[in-house]
Image (cartoon, coloured by chain):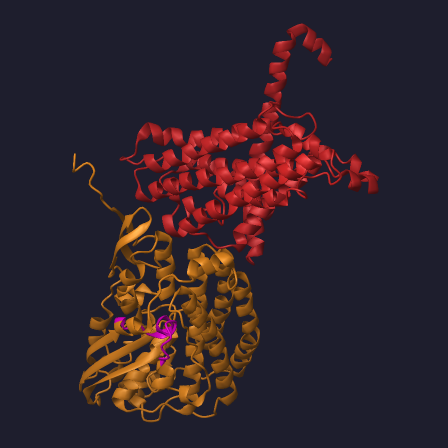
Amino acid sequence: MIDIVRLHIGELAFNIIIILVKTAIVFGVAMLHVAYATYFERKVIGHMQVRLGPMRVGYHGLLQPIADGLKAFFKEDIIPSGADRPVFVVAPLIAMFATISSLSVIPFFDGFVIADINVGLLYIFAMSSLGAYGIVMAGWASNSKFSFLGGLRSSAQVVSYEIAMGLSLVGVMLMAGSLNLSEIVKAQQGYWHGMFLIPQFIAFFIFTVGMFAETNRAPFDLPEAESELVAGYFVEYSGMRFAFFFLAEYVGMIVMSSISVICFWGGWTLPLFLVNALPFLGEIPGIVIFMLKLYFHIFLFYWVRATLPRYRYDQLMSLGWKVLIPLALVNIVVTSVVKFFL
Amino acid sequence: MKDALRHRELTLNMGPQHPATHGVLRLVLEIDGETVVKCTPYVGYLHRGTEKLCEHRTYLSALPLMDRLDYISSMANDVGYCVAVERLFGIEPPQRAKFIRSMVCEMTRISSHILWLGTHALDIGAMTVFLYAFREREWIMDLFEMLCGARLTVSYPRIGGVRNDVSQEFLDSLYDFCEEFPSRIEEYETLIDQNRIWLQRTKGIGVISAEEAVNWGFTGPTLRGSGVDYDVRKYFPYDAYDQVEFDVPVGKEGDVYARYRCRMEELRQSVRIIKQCIEKLPKGPIMAPDAPKFTLPPKDKVLKDMEAMIHHFVMLTKGPITAPVGEIYSSVEVPKGELGFYIVSDGSGRPYRLRLRSPSFVHVSALPRLCVGSLVADVIANIGTIDVVLGECDR
């Protein structure tokens, strides 16, 4: 059936259709995940804080994300009179598209990736840096001092933590010998441990800290520090534009978690010794393994948010530059030396 | 050209509507980057003219206004006012009333301190502590409701005693609370006490030396965090505080963390005081026999008995006619610090002048001293650490 279609419309058109279908699937699933990530965040944190979370809309509040989405959609779109209008309008779109397009290089299971490019990891970094522009522009264009400070904090934070994160992944690149995300997953299968988490635990630690900073989540939620800057860079945004930032944040969480799963947790695979010991584990589809690992990371975001206080701006900077970056450099040297001699 | 390169600070208006300014405090900050260069507090957004209102009310009917000063610790304010009026009139409340008052004051201290802990932690970003703290605060509110029917604005103490006696059921529930609460304090401490981020955010922030703190007029835990061992309950005891044992926790460093530790220890001391009050609670009347002018006659008598009705009418319109001429300053230790009442009486049934010395006002005035030179995030920590309630600050 598929072959007949391919013959009729030609190779190129067929590939384009396949990519479009994959994009639609990934986009749809990701949007659904974002919607229910907000729900589970409220539920998880709610139960950690001896309360119930959303309970009213639907059974145990299950329809809450849909109600929230509808509300955001129908809300009045307010643009402050002093705002820089074009920049104000464009900023949330940049933030959202930058993070959503990162999803295109992530292999969710064996062979399922929209764009299997050789510099996948670099692409992700490029896109997440681009996302910071959205935040900076939003902070600037709102013509509000609180958002301005939020935007400044964000740019400083993203620049510093991008470096630490990038350096931490160099160790993974060295071990895998590739920047292609599918290759990185496959490379992990070649080792006895089956996940880079074990040899690259320093890198994993740095990446995890960087992951929180990169997505502006607690304890590094300084750009939107509720008690200091009210809501930071999106204080003037309302309705759908606010929802775009929200979307960007949650897609960012999913992307960063996926990178962590791919680079440190073996992606859609399980360690070989585990599968050899318990053969039925080999029967689990890759997507399930990937998703379970992803959900664990998302849960980690919530867990940390419910537990830790917020860092101060200068403390965040000194942690990034004085602790994480030197540590990442040491990790690179050690990994290189070990790799050279073994 | 020169003008274009002129260096100018950014003026940031924080409040009166801001999530971390605890009510309606307004701070105008001048910031250079994130460093605060100048900080000017503006107060008065919650000014209701309490002092002036009191001049037009009888001594008894001024009492509900005291609930609304520091609405988080209304019981302690009421007790403070009653103690002041009693000292003016020379009334001695019975022992049982004294113990009950000390007991409810300490309950208020617990409720105020855990509210402070929750909001302070929330400001610094630890969200969960806030909800844990509110769980226990709810418990105390329920106990207040059981005691007098009101949860927040209680108006429970009366001049010369208390409004109604405590039931055995209430005492039992309160004792259960005292048994359970220390473990809850440990729960809060597990979350933040040794947390590295919490320590970084609070240690060495908002430091003020003992001498300077005294000169600024600090009182309460804000002063004791700097190492000054001053507590009205110990030095000028009122009610039953001279009959119970408790320690006054004192800090050393005078920073946000030291004040945090002081308040946490005070929670434990309050539990200790409440337990002693329950154990030592004597039998007897709850209103002073020589304070009939402050006790409303029972309602059923007012409707049937001539004397009682006249009594009721006179009390609510003229106030006590036998007020002595003179003036008095009396202060009590409310959770925020020393709350002072200066009353001038001209012999009529109303105070000629009533002046409140509110700890929050004094502490807010020291905010520039604490904030200048620190970062914007520290301003939030400093607002939290002085524990202001604007109802009392603006009066």
Q: Position of residue A155 (x, y in %)?
A: 41, 38
Q: Which chain is orange?
A: B
Q: Position of residue A68 (x, y in %)?
A: 49, 40
Who's the residue at 43% across and 51% down the image? A315
Which of the image's four quarters has the N terminus of chain A? top right
Q: Which chain is red?
A: A
Instruction: Report the span colored magenta.
Output: B216-231
Q: Position of residue B144 (x, y in %)?
A: 46, 73
Q: Is residue B221 magenta?
A: yes
Q: Is residue A81 left or right of residue A151?
A: left
A314 in relation to A211, above or below: below
Who's the residue at 52% across and 30% down the image? A100
Residue B387 in sight in this render: no
- Nearest the camera: A56 or A211? A211
Give the quadrant of residue B96.
bottom left
Residue B383 in sight in this render: yes
A185 in relation to B71, above or below: above
Q: Is residue A52 magenta?
A: no
Q: Position of residue A336 (x, y in %)?
A: 62, 36
Which of the image's four quarters has the C terminus of chain A? top right
Give the quadrant of residue B123.
bottom left
